[in-house]
Amino acid sequence: MHNGSNPLISVCIINYNQGRFFADALNSYLSQTYSPLELIVIDDCSTDNSVEIINNLLKEKNVKANFIVNPVNWGVCKNMNLAISLSKGKYFSVVASDDYFGPQRYERLINASKKSDENYKLFYSNCNMVDVAGNILESDFIQYFRPGLKSRSGIVFQELLKGNFIPAIALLIKKDVFDSIGLFDESLRLEDYDMWLRIAKKFKFEYVQDDEVYYRQLDNSLMRTLQKGSLYFQEHFNVLYKHIGNLDKNNSKQIVKQLYNLYKANLKRTKSPNLKLTGKLFIAIFKSL
């Protein structure tokens, strides 16, 4: 899909110690039927030979890219904000270096965007969850994390309050939304969920069918690391707590119930109360009254 009037999409591939998978992400980018595309690659101070691998692949395939090597490890959130600030496109997409996707990914998402009105700012699909070798573990990310989800398009804020179902690997964002709601919150570790909530509170989402997006599950990934301990419950709690002051009474009461359930789950895992979460829970209850 090449048309001189097509809007530019800025694609950012973020890598940390996953150089062995970078070829999959890069080949996915190069295979796209849509153009024009802009590529930004950020290596977050890898301790393996990722930088060498990435440099060699970019040269070997003669790829034009803005390749940034961080002198220190910044983390995903700060790198996404950096990429947004450097990007020139009307649309923005972020990809982890160990993920990959089919050749029509951006064409499908852009086509959906062209058919929607200006209130639609985020376009996303489902994805397959795969292991290190690319074997499918789960073929339906959304069903896995949010069984029984009622609405995938339009106004999805209420559904997102119940839990995240948007795979970051599988979306395209109109970049002007960041002018309206700001960049990713670098104080959070589930910054993507926070961002989807912030966008959904003001704008609409569009679900796009695509069965060729692959989200690789690695034992050392951030999400796996969070889920192994109690941090996931704490970080999920912190995202929802951030939003309780901006909700009406009905939504506030719904969030308090979720905060209480997360508090209990964290307590069950740690065997001792977290004083910060305890204080926040009481504040949340007070705000919902």
Image: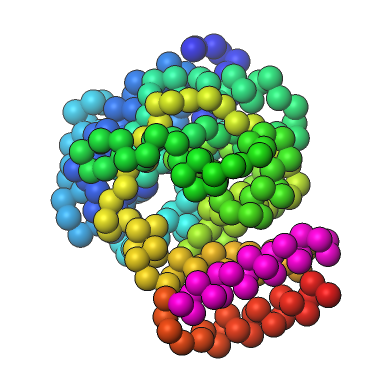
Residue 211, magenta (yes or no): no
- Vertical position of residue 270 compared to residue 225: above or below: below
Q: Residue at x 79, y 75 (%)?
A: 287
Measuring from the top left, give residue 60's x and y in whole percent.
19, 28
Task: Say whether residue 105 is left or right of residue 205.
Answer: left
* Tally of numbered tags: 0
Q: Main secondary structure of the magenta part?
A: helix
Magenta run includes residue 249: yes
Which span of residues is magenta-colored? 248-268
Front one among 3 and 146: 146
Q: Give the image location of residue 144, x and y in percent.
A: 46, 44
Q: Is residue 36 visible?
A: no
- Residue 282 is left or right of residue 193, and the answer is right
* 27, 9: nearer the viewer: 27
Can you tell which quarter of the image residue 226 is in? bottom left
**Left or right of residue 24: residue 82:** right
Q: How is the image coloured?
A: rainbow
Nearest the eye: 212 or 34: 212
Residue at 64%, 25% in the rendered image: 113
- Please say if 276 is above or below 31: below
Q: Where in the figure is residue 165, as x and y percent of width and height? A: 55, 46
Q: Write the residue at 63% across / 54% down.
A: 162
**Compared with residue 260, is residue 206 higher up or lower down, i.e. above or below?**
above
Q: Locate the C terminus by quadrant.
A: bottom right
The quarter of the displayed image where residue 67 is located: top left
- Taking depth in this image into account, of 163 and 243 the one nearest to the observer is 163
Q: Residue at x 58, y 80 (%)?
A: 277
